[in-house]
Amino acid sequence: MRKLVFIIINYNDYKTTKRLLDNIKDYKIIDKIYVVDNHSTDNSYEELKKLNIKRYEVIESPSNKGFASALNIGAKKAIEDFSNVDIIFSNSDIIINSNDNLEELKNTLDGREVGLVGPVVFQQGTLNRGWKIPRPIDEVLSNLPGIGKKFNKKMYYNDSHYKGESSEVEAISFCFFLIKSEVLKKIGFFDENTFLYYEENIMASKLKHTRYKILVNNNVTIIHDHSVSIDKSINYINKYKILKKSQMYFETTYNHASSLEKFLLKLTIRLTLITLYVRIFLRGGFRK
């Protein structure tokens, strides 16, 4: 039977990571737990090293080159230790109900043409199950200040899509997912040209050109205590700038946006940024 490793990405969030470790440390289906500390600026690495947990190892990234880089560090260590292996990647702010949940997800991944599997993700009172890869024009419309969210909703599947044990989708959330090591090697691992965001769409675009499917297991739900780690470390304006930089990279590199589409993307990004600055100013956000 193939081994299963569980990789948690940590950045300045030792307490939340420890909560997840306490959650999963006795799950028998897991053969190894790695925590990749993405060059935290607090005492996370030192605290994580102190933990006495079976089958556990903490890895310190020499620098913080972004989320995809941390994923690659964990993946390459797992492959070095186990060769062909099934890998779970997880944010620190995840809650899992039982060992059986992981076993069911692993069974879904065992399908011959299955490359990536995710659960139903419960976050902020909603269910996140999957979405379609956006085209440049979809992104332009979703960037429009005030009304962009309405267009963004069109990228998600209807509830009727999620019938039976599993459903095929184009992309899934990377807060928690499973992947085969062979798939990672085939597609050249994660693209490290984004610091944060759009890893899901990039992976989806890579897999689109292979025989591997992306599935959501409709019977397994995990809880995502959404963006706890990010919100602690990055202010809202900086998050937006990082998000849109990743968006431009994805649409240019993977969707091959035309000159007009790139112009419209830049224009709508700037319009929204101006709107954000105005809102902050009106709320007194720039007062000393």
Image: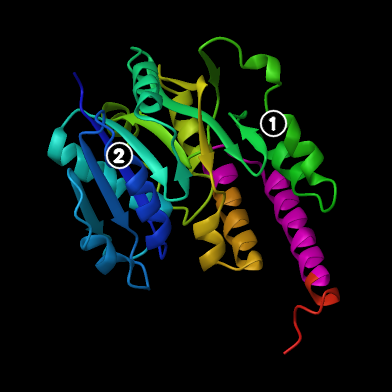
Magenta stretch encompasses residue 251: yes
Q: Quadrant of residue 277?
A: bottom right
Q: Is residue 71 visible?
A: no
What amino acid does circle 1 point to?
A: Met
In the rendering, at what x and y percent does residue 255 appear? 58, 37
Left or right of 54, for residue 118: right
Q: Which residues are magenta?
A: 250-279
In the rendering, at what x and y percent does residue 90 appear? 40, 43
Crowd tier of the residue under label 1, counting other residues whose Cα lies within 10 Å: few below 14, some 14–19, many 20 or above? some
Residue at 41%, 65% (x, y): give it. Answer: 12
Q: Quadrant of residue 158?
A: top right
Magenta stretch encompasses residue 188: no
Position of residue 2 relative to residue 237, above or below, is above
Picture colour scheme: rainbow
What amino acid does circle 2 point to?
A: Phe
The residue mark sitting in front, 1 or 2, is 2
Q: Which residue is mark 1?
A: 155
Q: Secondary structure at mark 2?
A: strand
Residue at 21%, 62% (x, y): give it. Answer: 49
Q: Which residue is mark 2?
A: 6
Left or right of 256, for residue 26: left
In the rendering, at what x and y percent does residue 275 appear? 81, 64
- Say which of 160 and 21 sits in front: 21
